[in-house]
Image (spheres, helix red, strand yellow):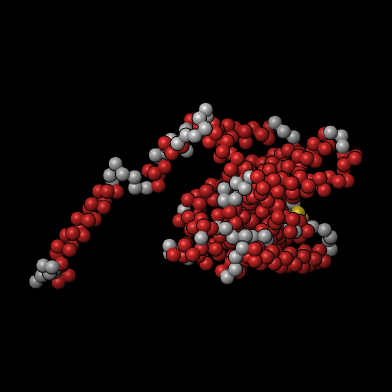
Amino acid sequence: MSDLTSTKTPSEAPVVRRWQSSTVRTRRWRRSPHLNTSYRDDLSLFVYSSSRKAGMAALVALVLLFPFTVDNYWLNVANFCAIAAVGVLGLQIVTGMTGQLSLGHAAFLAVGGFVAAGLYLHLGLQLWLAAPAAMLAGGITGALAGLPALRIRGFYLGITTLAVQYVVIAAGLKYQSYIQSSRGTSGSLTVPAPDLGLFSITSVFQWYFFLVVIVAVATLAVTNLRRSTLGRSFLAVRQGELAAEALGINVAWVKIIAFALSGVFGGLAGSLSTYYYRSVSIENFDLLLSVTYLAMIIIGGVGSIQGAIYGAVFVTATPLLVGRIIELLGLTASLGGALRAIELGVFALTMMAFLLFEPDGIAGVWRRLKAYFARWPYKYTDMTTTAKR
């Protein structure tokens, strides 16, 4: 008795054979040594040049040797820049990559900072458990803040994100007052030095290497995100929402994810700043902080991951550098009272200068500088002929 499941009609047999032969050809095509069938094969066409390898090695050496050549003041400045770099990477996702204006990024940092402090005050959880919880809380807050982006855009969206920040500030003020009244304290909420199990971070020197690792992991994550399907969807929404929707992209879902990821990085930066300063206060998360983070991506380069790092370092270190120069010149007695105004003035003038004369930011300057040396001594050279990155 023949098996009915293996019985094929004469008309079905050629179809099966054609399908099997097509599958065989597809498998042979995937194994072909003459075709690139993966992202790794595609990158193999653009090998790193010797100059780029030397530059990367010099950068790694500079980062590793920096804490051994400076004092604690500049180590603190470097740590401030590292924490800001983690937070601005989240803003770069939603504003630089997706094109959604966010004026309330400080709200995500506030959520992360207060969640980290609250988990220690109520449950005794340290940074290695509080940071993931702060990232989750920041992501949820970001997703809620992104809901208005489904209906409005541009300046009006920025106003709604600013409203979310003030809601978070009001809630944080209530929570801070409750903790102060219940514990009989005043001022900010305090936490101890972070205990990571195997060791504790008690000095700025240890904080430096810990934050360098965090920044490296965060930068690598955002870089791979940009290369992924979701990252390309972010870029498509930034270029045109109607065109992205016509290509089959769920624009609403992409916007919500962008705001959620922005909140994740903001929550991580907020938890790190809480444990670095060993305290958190709602007064630290005002509108000026959100404007400062927005200035970081404008000065560094909107949409550029490297530009986010450049902007974080420039905006964070420049006011501190101005104060240090005034101190070294012996002008503290005459200009000490106006030091804050001078720092804000330098910050405002720098931001206006980049907006007027360099819209691409520091990343754009760096790209043109590299192109100049690659073309030199010729002014016009076809750069597409060089398959190096």
Q: Quadrant of the N terminus?
A: bottom left
Q: Residue at x 73, y 38 (%)?
A: 74
Residue with the most extreme left position: 1
Answer above or below: position of 305 versus 253.
Answer: above
The one nearer the camera, 313 or 335, is: 335
Q: Is residue 345 visible from the viewing direction of this image? A: yes
Q: Residue at x 78, y 47 (%)?
A: 345
Q: Residue at x 82, y 37 (%)?
A: 326
**Residue 161, percent across and down?**
66, 64
50 left or right, relative to 68: left
The one nearer the camera, 117 or 169, is: 169
Indicate the quadrant where residue 20 lies.
bottom left
Q: Residue at x 69, y 67 (%)?
A: 163
Answer above or below: position of 297 versus 11.
Answer: above
Residue with the most extreme right position: 333
Indicate the quadrant where residue 5 lies.
bottom left
Answer above or below: position of 266 versus 147.
Answer: above
